Image: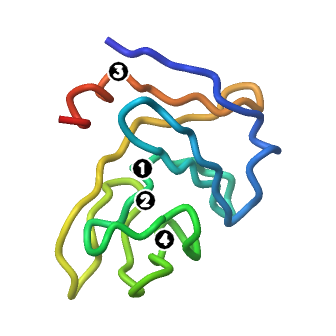
């Protein structure tokens, strides 16, 4: 079951930038790419817990600001040669609004 939550206008998230959503269990970085795609991932690199929301967005990936790990925004997977993964959440844009599905937030926080 989906539980879509309206979190912001697409225009409120800069292209190639991010905004952070704080929950009781984790911070979630919501990214907007140059082609206006949106992605939501845990705001924590699997390597050294760097704040991904402060990283550089390129294509559909982000580079961690601490040690240059690159992560795929859709899957949360580190891109070679690095290995690791961070949590992802379904995200979409409807009517110029960004919606995130937090239904698996409890499971992922454990």
* Within-10-Å neighbours for mark 1: few <14, some 14–19, many 20+: many
Decide which of tag 3 and tag 2 comes sooner along the chain: 2
Please identify the quarter of the rendering in which residue 97 is found.
top right
* Of pointers 3 and 4, the one earlier in the residue sequence: 4
User: From the viewer's perspective, is 87 left or right of 93?
Assistant: left
Task: Count neighbours of disc 2 (C-alpha within 10 A) and say few if under 14, some if 14 to 19, many if 20 or more.
Answer: many
Label 4 element class? strand
Relative horizontal placement of residue 94, taking residue 4 as reference (left or right) = right
Which residue is tagged 3? 103
CB under 8 Å between discs 2 and 1:
yes
Where is residue 52? Give x, y as percent.
48, 65
What label does residue 73 carry, if any? 2
Label 4 crowd bin: few (<14), some (14–19), many (20+), radius 10 Å? many
- Residues at marks 2 and 4 touching, judged by CB atoms closer than 8 Å: yes
Query: Which mark identifies residue 41?
Result: 1
Left or right: where does residue 90 sit relative to residue 30?
left
Closer to the eye: label 3 or 2? 3
Spatial separation of the CA atoms under disc 1 and disc 3: 14 Å
- What colour-coding does the image apply? rainbow
Q: Which mark is residue 62?
A: 4
Q: Are marks 1 and 4 in contact (CB under 8 Å)?
A: yes
Q: Quadrant of residue 32?
A: bottom right
């Amino acid at each position: 079951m989906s539980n879509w939550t309206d979190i912001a206008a697409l225009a409120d998230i800069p292209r190639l930038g991010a905004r952070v959503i704080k929950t009781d269990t984790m911070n979630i970085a919501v990214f907007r790419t140059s082609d206006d795609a949106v992605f939501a991932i845990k705001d924590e690199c699997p390597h050294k817990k760097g704040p991904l929301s402060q990283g550089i967005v390129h294509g559909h990936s982000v580079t961690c600001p601490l040690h240059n790990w690159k992560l795929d925004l859709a899957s949360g997977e580190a891109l070679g040669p690095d290995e690791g993964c961070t949590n992802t959440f379904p995200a979409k844009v409807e009517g110029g609004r960004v919606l995130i599905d937090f239904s698996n937030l409890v499971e992922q926080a454990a």
